[in-house]
Amino acid sequence: MKVVTANRLLNGEVVWFGAEETWVGDLSRAKVLETKDDLAAAMAAAQRSIADRDVVEAYEVDVLLEDGCLTPKRLRERIRAAGPTILPEFGKQTRAATA
């Protein structure tokens, strides 16, 4: 299973290609792509959104279904899906100070 992600050009927000073929901010509303044809169609739509300057850097992400929720396989994508890690206790400064 795959989904398509990008960043909204206006504000940099992580977005996902949704079931309504619009960009959504919540991974749970992303369109799950099960076939190569579905992925190709979603990536074509993403390229149109890039050309229209709605989003940048669209790419596919492997996901799995865990307890009924979509979860990216890679840690990087899990972090992107959860939102920015701007809390001091999780930021780079705290890790550097304790290292």
Image: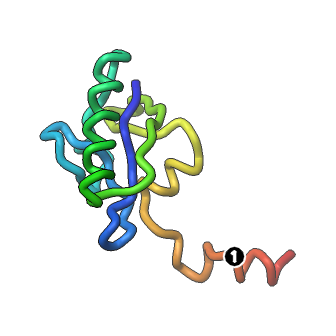
Residue at the image position 28 percent from the left and 57 percent from the top: 25
- Above or below, 13 relative to 26: below
Q: Residue at x 61, y 73 (%)?
A: 90
Query: In x, y percent, where is residue 59?
Result: 45, 41
- Look at mark 1 in the image and give the residue it sits on: 92
Query: The residue under label 1 is which amino acid type?
Result: Lys
Residue 94, compared with residue 42, is above or below; it is below
- Quadrant showing the C terminus: bottom right
Vertical arrangement, residue 3 with respect to residue 16, above or below: above
Q: Residue furthest right?
A: 99
Relative to 55, is 59 on the left or the right?
A: right
Q: Quadrant of residue 33?
A: top left
Counting from the top left corner in percent of width and height, residue 44 is at: 30, 34
Residue positioned 29% across, 22% down in the render: 38
Q: How many marks?
A: 1
Q: Quadrant of the N terminus?
A: top left
Question: Which residue extends farthest left?
Answer: 20
Q: Position of residue 30 (x, y in %)?
A: 27, 41
Q: Secondary structure at mark 1?
A: helix
Q: Depth check: give the residue in front, 67 or 53.
A: 53
Q: Residue furthest front?
A: 51
- Residue at the spot 39% in from the left edge and 56% down from the top edge: 56
Is the image coloured rainbow, by chain, by secondary structure, or in one colour? Answer: rainbow
- Asked which quadrant contains residue 96, the reply is bottom right
Side of 54 relative to 6 (left or right): left
Q: Residues within 10 Å of mark 1 (few under 14, many from 20)?
A: few
